[in-house]
Amino acid sequence: MTKVSLIHTVQSVLVTFDKRIKNVIDDVKIVNTLDEYLASDPEERGEFTVNNMQRLFSIVKCAEMTEPDVIVVTCSTLSPAIEKIRPFIKTPIITIDEAMIRKAAETGSKITIMATAESTVEPTKTKLLSEVKKINKAIDLSVIVCPEAYVAIKAGDKEYHDEIVKRRALEIKQQDVVILAQASMAHLEDIVQKICGCTVLSSPRMCIAQLKEKLEKNV
C-alpha cells in the first residue's frame, strides 16, 4: 500500500481532497495535517514571516516522519516557501499548483488568475511568469481577487462563497485561460468555464494526476 501525506490550510479542502485521491488512486493510505494559521497569517500580515516558515518546516518534517511515499501541499500560498524547504526533505514533495501553472503557461497568452485569498496571488503570478519564461513566451496577465469569498469559505458558508465567485467571473472577457488559484474553488471549474467561455484550470484534479504518475513511477 502506498502512503501519501497531505498538508492543508483549509478544512473543506481536507475533506474533498482525500476523497478525490481515493477515487483515482487504489490502495492508498492518506495522512492529513491541517494548519489554518499557515495561510491566515500571511493573509493578515501581507507577508510570509520567518516564524511561519519555521512552523511550515516543522509540519513538513512531521509529515516526513509518517514515512509517506509523497508529501502533497494543498495550499498555493505555501508554494514559494516549500521551494525553499524542499532541499532539506528527503521525501518527494508536490505542491498543488505546479501542474496547473505549467498547463496554463502552455495553453494561452491571455490569462486571468482568479483568487479568493490575496496571499495566493503573488506566489501564483511568480510561478506562472517563471514557467512562461522557460518557454520564451509573453503573456497578458490579469488578476481578480474575491476576499469576501475567502471569508465565506473559512466560515463554512460554501453557498455564499460560490455566489461571489460566479458573480466576479462575469467580469472575465476574451481570455484564453482562467486559473482558479484556490483548491477550494475547484468544484466551480465547469461553471466558471461556462460563464467565461474559455479554458478554466483548477489545481486538485491536475495535482492528483501528477501524484498518480509519481506513485506509479515509484513502483
Image (cartoon, grey):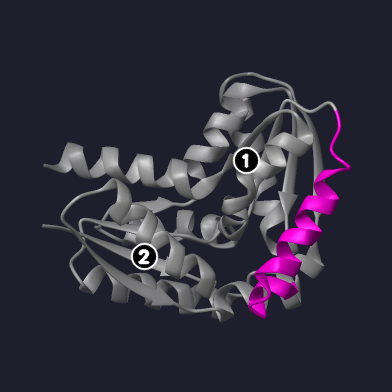
Nearer-the-camera pick, 101 or 153: 153
Mark 2: give few (<14), some (14-19) or many (20+) Cα within 10 Å: many
Residue 121 lies, with reference to residue 200, above or below; the image says below
The residues colored magenta run 151-173
Mark 1: give few (<14), some (14-19) or many (20+) Cα within 10 Å: some
| Identity, as a three-letter code, of the amino acid under mark 1 | Asp
The structure residue drawn at horizontal position 79% and vertical position 28%, both measured from the top left corner, is 175
Magenta span contains residue 165: yes
The structure residue drawn at horizontal position 38% and vertical position 54%, both measured from the top left corner, is 20
The structure residue drawn at horizontal position 58% and vertical position 52%, both measured from the top left corner, is 187
Magenta span contains residue 206: no
Q: Position of residue 110 (x, y in %)?
A: 77, 26
Nearer-the-camera pick, 212 or 93: 212
**Of helix, strand and loop, which mostly describes the magenta segment?**
helix
| Identity, as a three-letter code, of the amino acid under mark 2 | Leu
Query: Nearer the N terminus, badge 2 or badge 1?
Result: 2
Residue 132 lies, with reference to residue 81, above or below; the image says above
Quarter placement of the C terminus: top left
Q: Name the side, left or right, on which 212 lies relative to 153.
A: left
The residue beneath circle 1 is 190
Q: Secondary structure at mark 1?
A: helix
Q: Position of residue 117 (x, y in %)?
A: 71, 63
Nearer-the-camera pick, 155 or 38: 155
Q: Position of residue 151 (x, y in %)?
A: 74, 74
Quarter of the image where one finds residue 197? top right
The residue beneath circle 2 is 6
- Which numbered circle lies on residue 121? none
Q: Name the side, left or right, on which 176 lies relative to 73.
A: right
